[in-house]
Image (cartoon, grey):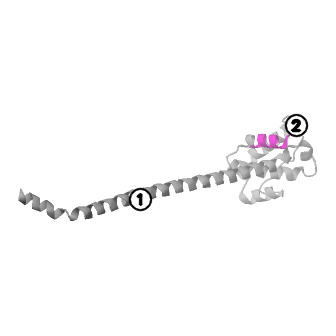
C-alpha cells in the first residue's frame, strides 16, 4: 500500500500542470472550430449580396430595354419619319431581352404596360416586331446589334421591311 501511495504522491505536482494544459487546449479547439464557421457565414453573406446586386443590375437592364422597345409600339410613331429607327431599336431591344431570358412576347407585353398603351392599338406594331424578330433573330450578330441599337441601317447583313399599318 505504501508503494501505491508513494507513486501517487509523485503525480501530485504534475496534476495542476496537466489541468492547465487541458484547459488551455479546450478553448483553442473551440476557437478553431468557430472561426471557419464565421468565415463560412461571411462568405455565404457575401455571395448573397453579390447575387442580389447582379439581379438588381439584370432588372435595370431589362427595364432599360423595355423602355427602348415601348416607343415602337405606338402606331403613330411607327408610321412617322422615325418609324424605321424605332423599328431597329426595338429589334435590338428584343434581342437584348432574349439574352436576359425574356421572350419577345413577354418583352412586348411589358413594353405595352410600361408605356400605358392600349393593347388593341399596339397589336399591329407588336405583331410586326414579333414577326420581324422571329425572321431575323438568327442573323443578328454583335456588329449588327450595335448598328440596330444606334438606329442605323443594318444592310446588307439584315434587310428590314418597313412597318405597314
In the image: residue 42, left or right of residue 74: left
Is residue 31 located in the magenta-colored stretch of the structure? no
Q: Which region shows up in magenta?
A: 107-117
Q: Quick one: label 2, few (<14), some, or many (20+) residues within 10 Å?
A: some
- Mark 1, residue position: 31
For the point 6% across and 60% down, the residue is: 3
For the point 77% across and 56% down, the residue is: 157
Residue at the extreme top of the image, as rendered: 120
Q: Position of residue 12 (x, y in %)?
A: 19, 62
- Mark 2, residue position: 121
Mark toward the viewer: 2 or 1 = 1
Q: Position of residue 99 (x, y in %)?
A: 68, 50
9 vs 104: above or below: below
User: 148 or 59, which is in the foreground?
Assistant: 59
Question: Alpha-carbon distance for marks 2 and 1?
Answer: 68 Å
Our reading of the magenta stretch's main secondary structure is helix
Amino acid at each position: 500500500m505504501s508503494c501505491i501511495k508513494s507513486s501517487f504522491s509523485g503525480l501530485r505536482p504534475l496534476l495542476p500542470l496537466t489541468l492547465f494544459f487541458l484547459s488551455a487546449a479546450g478553448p483553442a479547439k473551440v476557437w478553431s472550430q468557430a472561426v471557419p464557421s464565421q468565415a463560412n457565414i461571411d462568405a455565404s453573406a457575401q455571395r448573397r449580396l453579390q447575387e442580389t446586386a447582379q439581379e438588381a443590375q439584370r432588372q435595370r437592364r431589362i427595364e432599360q430595354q423595355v423602355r427602348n422597345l415601348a416607343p415602337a409600339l405606338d402606331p403613330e410613331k411607327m408610321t412617322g419619319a422615325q418609324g424605321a429607327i424605332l423599328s431597329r431599336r426595338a429589334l435590338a431591344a428584343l434581342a437584348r431581352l432574349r439574352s436576359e431570358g425574356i421572350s419577345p412576347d413577354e418583352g412586348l407585353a411589358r413594353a405595352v404596360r410600361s408605356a400605358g398603351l392600349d393593347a388593341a392599338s399596339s397589336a399591329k406594331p407588336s405583331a410586326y416586331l414579333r414577326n420581324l424578330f422571329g425572321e431575323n433573330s438568327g442573323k443578328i450578330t454583335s456588329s449588327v446589334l450595335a448598328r440596330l441599337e444606334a438606329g442605323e441601317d443594318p444592310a446588307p447583313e439584315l434587310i428590314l421591311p418597313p412597318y405597314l399599318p
